[in-house]
Image: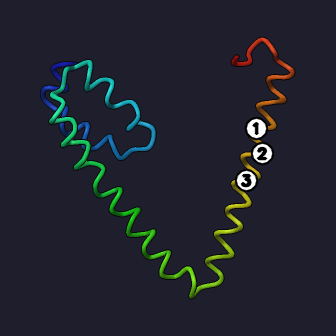
Amino acid sequence: MQRYFIRFGGLTVLVCRPLPVVRTFIALPAGIARMPRLRFHIDAFVGFWPWCFGLAYMGLQLVQCWDSDPQLRTVMHQLDGLIVVALLIGVGWFVWHCWHHRIGCPR
C-alpha cells in the first residue's frame, strides 16, 4: 500500500474525495501509507472544489427559480414529505427490530 500511495496517492485522493462513500475512508489508507499531510490536504481540496462549486451553482439556480416557478416549490415540498415518511419508516423499523431482537440492540 505504501508503494501504491507513493506512486498514485495524490491522484487517488483527488479522485476519491468527491465520491460519497469512499471520501469517508480514503484518509485511512493515506494515513497508513504516511502520505504527507500537506499533499493530502491540497489533493483533497482540489478534488472537492468542483463538487462544492457545482452544488453551490445548482443552489443559486434553484433560488432564482424558487419564487417565479410555483411548480418547483410544490415538487420540493413533496420531496420533503417523502423524506419525512422514509425517516419515520426507518425509525419505526429500527424500534420494531430492536424490540423483537433485544439481544442485538445497541446500548
Residue at the image position 35 percent from the left and 47 percent from the top: 18
The amino acid sitting under disc 1 is: Val
Q: CA distance from mark 2 to mark 3?
A: 6 Å
Is 27 positioned to the left or the right of 95 in the image? left
Image quadrant containing the N terminus: top left
Is 64 positioned to the left or the right of 78 in the image? left
Choose top left, top right, bottom left or bottom right for residue 75. bottom right
The amino acid sitting under disc 2 is: Leu
CA neighbours of label 1 inside 10 A, class few (<14), some (14 to 19), many (20+): few
The amino acid sitting under disc 3 is: Val
User: Which numbered dot is residue 84?
Assistant: 3
Q: Secondary structure at mark 3?
A: helix
Image quadrant containing the C terminus: top right
Q: How many marks?
A: 3
Q: Nearer the viewer, residue 3 or 46?
A: 46
Q: Are marks 1 and 2 in contact (CB under 8 Å)?
A: yes
Q: Which residue matches tag 2?
A: 88
Picture coordinates of residue 27, whole percent (x, y):
31, 29
CA neighbours of label 2 inside 10 A, class few (<14), some (14 to 19), many (20+): few
Choose top left, top right, bottom left or bottom right for residue 44. top left
Q: Which residue matches tag 1?
A: 91
Rendered position, 5 above or below 22: above
